[in-house]
Amino acid sequence: MITPYYKSLDRNFTLIKGDCIELLNQFEFKFDMIFADPPYHLSNNGFSVQSGKKVSVNKGIWDKSQGYEKDYLFDREWLSVCRNKLKDNGTIWISGTYHNIFSIARCLTELDFKILNCITWVKTNPPPNLSCRYFTHSAEYILWARKNSKNPHFYNYELMKEINGGTQMRDVWNLPSIAKWEKSCGKHPTQKPLCVLSRIIQASTKEGAWILDPFTGSSTTGIAANLLGRRFLGIDIDNEFLQISKARKEEISSIVKQKEYIDKLQKQAKLFGKTTNSIIVSDSEYSYARELPF
């Protein structure tokens, strides 16, 4: 029996602690969308620049490579489990760099997913290249795939077109890295910005949808989901990151803070078009027909 690490009072934000592969095999539930930010296997004793300072790229044991074959088998296993947790018309998004994204794409193809897009997220404020021996790394890649080729998926085409100035949105997104105000409760070494997750969630889900993040970290996925009227389950093995996730959710329990975040996201990434308004959903507006079994 799974016991939640944390469940918010509004029941829209749940965290469980442990290995995502083991935990996902222990309950029956189907999600509308999954976002995964798995280990990139970049902790190799190298250095990068952060806030103008030289810093180690080592993030933890969880980010160390075990060699190509073991890394590939790990990716295949968690993706297989996640596929079983998707609705037939559900989709999955996986972020990565050139270090792991090709392995992920191989696994998706082998598991009979249909890859829809490879989004290139171009960071408007990337860290400089210390070695000066190759081009500065300024992009990450986000694969979007549906569960299979037969079932149609949801894509909010009209909204994406509207916030893109009336033209079709392309698969190259120019969006900033994480802002300082997003770290108010603490930070995760690979924390994704709310603007990226907000676009993903709006593009591929409807209000009230259930979203899973199997490597939740500081739960940017969950915060974006709740701000946009979706429900969330996050899984992580690290107590420190789960505490940050809990604090972030409790921070946006205030309607004032929710509006503040929405306004910042609108300025940052044109979250809403002219015909759409800020979505701050009260507890009474959620549909509770589908509940997690714990």
Image (cartoon, helix red, strand yellow):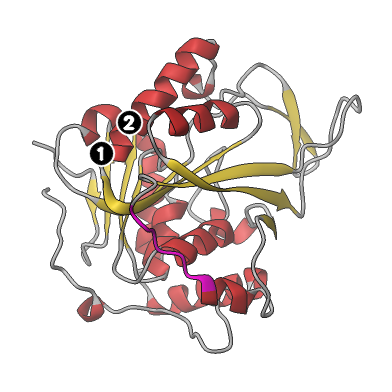
Q: Quadrant of the N terminus?
A: top left
The reply to whether dot 1 and dot 2 touch (C-beta < 8 Å) is yes
Taking the image as shown, residue 169 lies to the left or right of residue 191, namely: right
In the displayed structure, would residue 53 be above or below residue 7?
Answer: above
Classified by dominant secondary structure, the portion drawn in magenta counts as: loop
Q: Is residue 102 visible?
A: yes
For the residue pair 104 and 277, the one nearer the viewer reads as: 104
Q: Quadrant of residue 65?
A: top right
Residue marked by disc 1: 84
Type of amino acid under label 1:
Asn
Type of amino acid under label 2:
Ser
Residue marked by disc 2: 80
For the residue pair 263 and 163, the one nearer the viewer reads as: 163
At mark 1, the secondary structure is: helix
The answer to whether residue 156 is magenta is yes
Q: x%, y% of residue 107?
A: 45, 28
Q: State the residue at coordinates (46%, 23%).
A: 62
Q: State the residue at coordinates (42%, 27%).
A: 110
Q: Which residues are magenta?
A: 151-157
Taking the image as shown, residue 160 lies to the left or right of residue 224, namely: right
